[in-house]
Image (cartoon, rainbow, N blue to C red):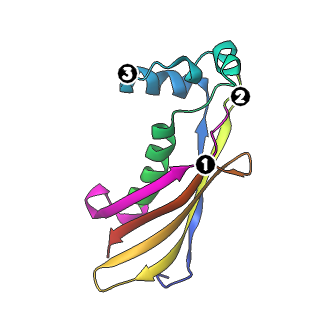
Amino acid sequence: MIEVGATIPERVFTINRELLKAYADASGDQNPIHQNEEFAISVGLPNVIAHGMLTMALVGKFVTDWAGGSSKVTHFGARFIKPVIVPANTDVDLTVTATISAIEDKSITLDLTATSAGIKVLGMAKATVLR
């Protein structure tokens, strides 16, 4: 039911080094923090991390799937607050859910939550979609 306070069922995306490589190749972002563990650690990261825009893209997929397509999304934004850490030979989760925070004549506002390994990775994440 679409009403303020209703929760959209969660979706879990799987992120692994293979996906990071494919995203790096598709996006052209070959920054070694997304592929080279030794380099990532040398610059103070705990391990290889997912591309922030990959994280946003997966959360955006959650929103567009629920809304019925990208043409229904009028606003989507968030702040990166923690990285998605992707150790070698490991699948990690990106768990996304949303709560309906406002309903207007023509739009619905979603408060989004994205976590990985139980840690919130996006802050102030919101989307507005057409009804």
For disc 2, the neighbor class at 10 Å (few under 14, some 14 to 19, many from 20) is: few
| Residue at image point 42% right, 56% down | 77
Q: CA distance from mark 2 to mark 3?
A: 23 Å
| Residue at image point 32% right, 62% down | 73
Residue occupied by mark 3: 28
**Which of the two labelled residues, at mark 2 and mark 3, occupies the earlier sequence position?**
3
| Residue at image point 29% right, 64% down | 72
Residue occupied by mark 2: 90
Q: Nearer the viewer, residue 130 or 120?
A: 120
- Secondary structure at badge 1 equals loop
Residue occupied by mark 1: 81
Judged from this view, the residue extending furthest toward the front is 43
User: Which x, y percent locates residue 66?
Assistant: 43, 63
Image quadrant assignment for residue 93: top right
**Which of the two labelled residues, at mark 2 and mark 1, occupies the earlier sequence position?**
1
User: Which x, y percent locates residue 122?
Assistant: 57, 52
Please give the count of numbered marks on the rendered protein. 3
**49 left or right of 105?**
right
Q: Viewer-nearest of labels 2 and 3?
A: 3
Q: Nearer the viewer, residue 39 or 86?
A: 39
Residue type of the residue flagged with mark 1: Ile
For disc 1, the neighbor class at 10 Å (few under 14, some 14 to 19, many from 20) is: few
Residue type of the residue flagged with mark 2: Thr
Q: Verify whether residue 27 appears in magenta.
A: no
Q: CA distance from mark 2 to mark 1?
A: 22 Å
